[in-house]
Image (cartoon, rainbow, N blue to C red):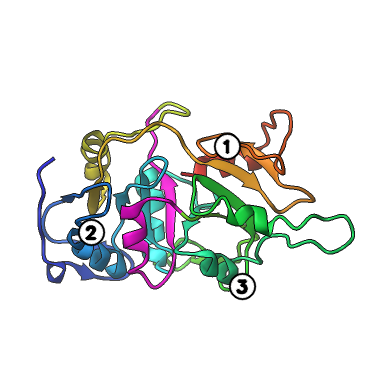
Amino acid sequence: MASAKRSPKRLKYSTPRFTKEGEFVSIEVDPSGADSWKLEPVIELLKQGAVGVIPTDTVYAIVCDCKNHSAVERLRRIKKIESSKPLSILCRSLRDIDTYTMGFPRGDGHGHANVFRAVKQCLPGPYTFILTASKELPKQCVGYGTTSVKYASRKNVGVRISDDAVCQAILQSMDAPLICTSVKGPKENEWMIDPTIIGDIYGPEGLDFLVDGGVRVAEPSTIVDMTGPYPKVIREGKGPILPWMVVEEEDESSLRQDLIASGT
């Protein structure tokens, strides 16, 4: 895919939506992150409220600034996700997880295991951990920019620390985590892994940019729910299921489907 450059100054932020002037931006980068300097325009766009696609250590993700309600609204519209459905966050480090969630279970001496040490061995890596949200996590906004706007605190949130050089280079330059949702095709459990196809399909839907890090493998993250009495595997993916994780029978509840839909 041909690279394109555009000055961030040509983009304007307006309420309630991000208004862009110019064409969809595609930037091709080395998956190793060796030419991460190319990402500077993308980082500026994200800070201004843009919505775009970036690679992770699993599949591609549609992302935006987690603190920008207008951007989150646009992401939902592009991906056709209902406002009530949860979205995960891509974090820069364990410090972000400590800030925006109540953290991982550390044991209490009453039979509840300290899994924090085990979790640290998994991150960065291909896992999404569902944790109890803290007050620092931006509230979920419905109807942003309208007279009927509503805000609600989130009880839980999926967190990821991606082991991908390009993804990390972008995150390290941001002031907060990125809201993320996997790039999927029209069929259930169909992952879009070719950036050229992603650009062709989602570009016209309103994306502002795409970071092309090459074709990925169709393996999403392994989702583990840490909000209950034990670490429960919600979806098996790229991350190996470890001895301290519990796998139960298939649960078709709406909560499980929501969590799977939001993970990358």
Q: Nearer the viewer, residue 73 or 24?
A: 24
As shown in the figure, which amino acid type bears the numbered disc 1? Pro
Closer mark to the observer between disc 3 and disc 2: 2
Which residue is label 1 attached to? 240
Which element is circle 1 on? loop
Distance from the alpha carbon under mark 3 to that under mark 2 = 33 Å
Q: Magenta residues, as a range?
A: 162-186
x and y percentages locating residue 115 in the rendered image: 71, 55
As drawn, is 164 to the left or to the right of 202? right
In percent of width and height, residue 63 lies at: 37, 54
* Residue behind mark 3: 135
x 61%, y 62%: residue: 154
Question: Mark 3: which secondary structure?
Answer: loop
Instruction: Identify the residue at horizontal 65%, vertical 64% (top origin).
Output: 103
Quadrant location of residue 67? bottom left
Q: Amino acid at mark 3?
A: Lys
